[in-house]
Amino acid sequence: MAEDIEAKIRRLRELGKATAEPETPSAPVPGPAPKARPPRRTRRLGSIRERERKKRILIGASVLILIILVASLGVYAWYSNRAKEELRNAKLQKIHELNSYFKGPIMNTSYGRATYQELYSRINAARSKEEVQKIDVVSAYKQVLTKYQQELAKKKAEEEQKMLNEAKANKKAEINLLFQSLLAQPLPDQLKNHVLEVKNSLIQDVENATSVSEVKAINAVPYLTQLWRDYYSYKIDSVKGKYVVLEFNGRKIIYSKEDAKAYLSGISNYTTLMMYTVQPVKFVKIAVLLTRERVVGGFISPNSTVMIFAKNGTKNYIKIADMGHVDMVLLPSDAGIINLNEQQGSSSSSSSTSNSQESSNQQSSASAGQTSVSQGGSSSNSESSSNSYSESSSATSYYSVNLGEIMRAISSGKIAGSTETIKQLQNYGDNLLALEEKLQLQNVPNGVPFLIIVEVPSVYVPDVLSHMDSLYIGEVVGES
């Protein structure tokens, strides 16, 4: 429309110029020399009016053209301002869209900032609304976002791999440390190879793990516990004899080999297993001097299985040895002396009046130590007669036998038939105690000491010797 207006204005200008210009005079004809110009004639009134009319037409056309120009310029300016406003609004909207997408961590990347700056420059440089609308912010953002996410995934994978490598290194160091104590033991070749196989298998599981959680889930403790049990079973089987000593925190207990294995198999923590020591049972003979009441009343016999206790303080008792065997029991010297007293008496009487009376009385006694045994009896018979007669008699004897003197006499060859005497004296002590138990008589005082030769495991010997003044021996009579 503006072009049409401008064309019309140009045509009007050309028309005005054509009207104002006078007609072109014809070419002069050469003639005689010019003469003097006659005086100017006065124009006619119609010509003046015609000229005025043309002038008014030109002025009107000029005003019309000016109005048209002003209107055209106004229209052009309105359209131009409207297009600029639409372009400005389109740019603002596009920049708002750009800012809504390109924000946050993505702007911390170099390519994110570069893409944003490029789009921003293109938006500002656009000269039309259509050109602004052609700028695809979303596609550019998706490309940047994809690259950013790939970098994040790569970085995350690198961090996870780093954490996984650190976890694997720590777990392998932990496994090597846990197996170090076991491998330091004197293991047999077969058991050592088995331990190494288990260790290498655990390390291989660590290497094959694909996540930190899988690495942390690998637990070597159950394997170590079983391997320590196998090691202790080997140690127990290596000990000679039927019994072993298990020591834990200074406490020593004797077990049979099977019981020791069963006991250790019930321990679920390998760190507790490591604190046990296995020792062989070596029996040592010890001479213990005890009073009668502290050695089962003195009735204990050789080959008896016993336990040894000690008095700790005024009322507390502790177990010193849970296994021992009696080798022999030596009686005190007082029990080797027999004192025997015997008294006998009889009497009789008669008279001539046939009245007669007869009586007899007999008594014997024997003592050993503080206890005596006496036996006696009496009888009487009376008869009447005229004659009388009486008679009485009595006898008393005492002797003492010292077994110690007899033994010394036999050893010096001063007794004839010493071989027979030795046979008679054999098991005298056991027979004496058996007789005492059978008769329920106390021939040996409680305060008299007994010398007991007892066999105890060597691990208990220091405790027995340190409690020598307060020992008690109990006989093991069975298990319920």
Image (cartoon, grey):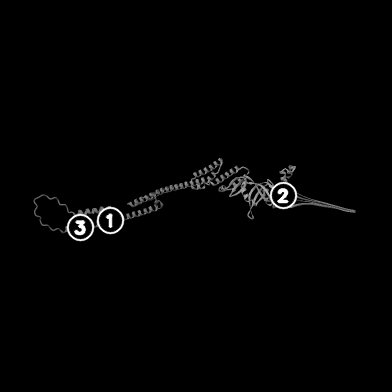
| Nearer to me, 85 or 342 | 342
Give the x, y percent position of residue 217: 52, 47
| Nearer to me, 178 or 429 | 429
Question: Mark on residue 55?
Answer: 3
Q: Is residue 345 left or right of residue 385?
A: left
| Secondary element type, mark 2 | helix
Residue 203 showing in the rendered view: yes
Q: Name the residue under label 1.
A: 73
Q: Is residue 342 left or right of residue 268?
A: right
| Secondary element type, mark 1 | helix
| Secondary element type, mark 3 | helix
Q: Is residue 185 above or below residue 93?
A: above
| Nearer to me, 95 or 340 | 340
Q: Is residue 370 left or right of residue 116?
A: right
Labels 1, 2: front one: 2
Q: Are marks 1 and 2 in contact (CB under 8 Å)?
A: no
**How many residues crowd mark 2 within 10 Å: few (<14), some (14–19), many (20+)?**
some
Q: In this view, does 434 lie above or below 53?
A: above
| Nearer to me, 329 or 267 | 329
The mark nearer the N terminus, 2 or 3, is 3
The mark nearer the N terminus, 1 or 2, is 1
Q: What's the residue at 22%, 54% (across, down)? A: 13
The mark nearer the N terminus, 3 or 1, is 3
Q: How far apart are marks 3 and 1 (CA)?
A: 26 Å
Give the x, y percent position of residue 388: 89, 53
Q: How far apart are marks 2 and 3 (CA)?
A: 182 Å
Amino acid type of the residue tagged 3 in the rendering: Lys
Q: In this view, does 462 lie to the left or right of 110?
A: right
Give the x, y percent position of residue 440: 74, 51
Question: Mark on residue 335?
Answer: 2
